Amino acid sequence: VQLQASGGGMVQAGGSLKLSCVASESLLSISFMEWYRQVPGKERQLVTRTSIDGTTAYGHSVEGRFTAARDNAKNTLYLQMNSLEPEDTAIYYCSAEKYSPERISRYWGQGTQVTVSS
């Protein structure tokens, strides 16, 4: 699975951004679609995890501000980010998990930079 993330940019605190992640194959073949973020020198942090039925689990720090959604017709995962805070500054990565009887495979997109100024 190839993933192409886009939509990052620079925004002031309190602003909004919407990220997109386009997959090279149908999302119906992908068990979980996820957004992660990483700050240099720190571990990659799970932001959202969306199952094949559209149910999403959110990290504590973003719950109530971020909304993830899958558009299966467009093979696209979105992340709507509202009320952004400087602490949300990071490189955001989308990820796909595919389950098969033999293995669990994980795929990563290239990342998109989000910068929130105070």
Image (tube, rainbow, N blue to C red):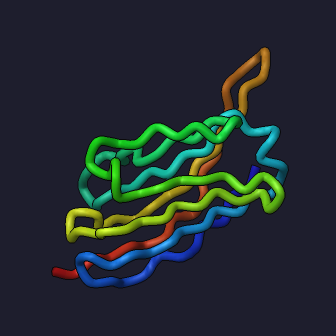
107 vs 51, nearest the viewer: 51
87 vs 40, nearest the viewer: 87
In the rendered view, would you say 41 is above or below 51?
Answer: below
103 vs 54, nearest the viewer: 54
Question: Residue 35 at what x, y percent from top left?
Answer: 50, 51
Quarter of the view holding residue 16: bottom left
Left or right, 47 with reference to 99: left
Name the residue at the front extreme.
Answer: 64
Name the residue at the left extreme.
Answer: 118
How many labels were placed on the picture? 0
Question: Residue 2 at what x, y percent from top left?
Answer: 73, 56
Question: Residue 55 at what x, y percent from top left?
Answer: 58, 37
In the rendered view, would you say 93 is above or below 114?
Answer: above
Is residue 106 in view?
Answer: no
Is residue 90 in view?
Answer: yes
Residue for point 26% across, 76% down: 14
Left or right, 36 with reference to 96: left
| Quarter of the image with the C terminus in it | bottom left
Question: Residue 17 at what x, y percent from top left?
Answer: 44, 75
Residue for point 58% across, 48% down: 95
Quarter of the view holding residue 9: bottom left
Residue for point 58% across, 73% down: 6
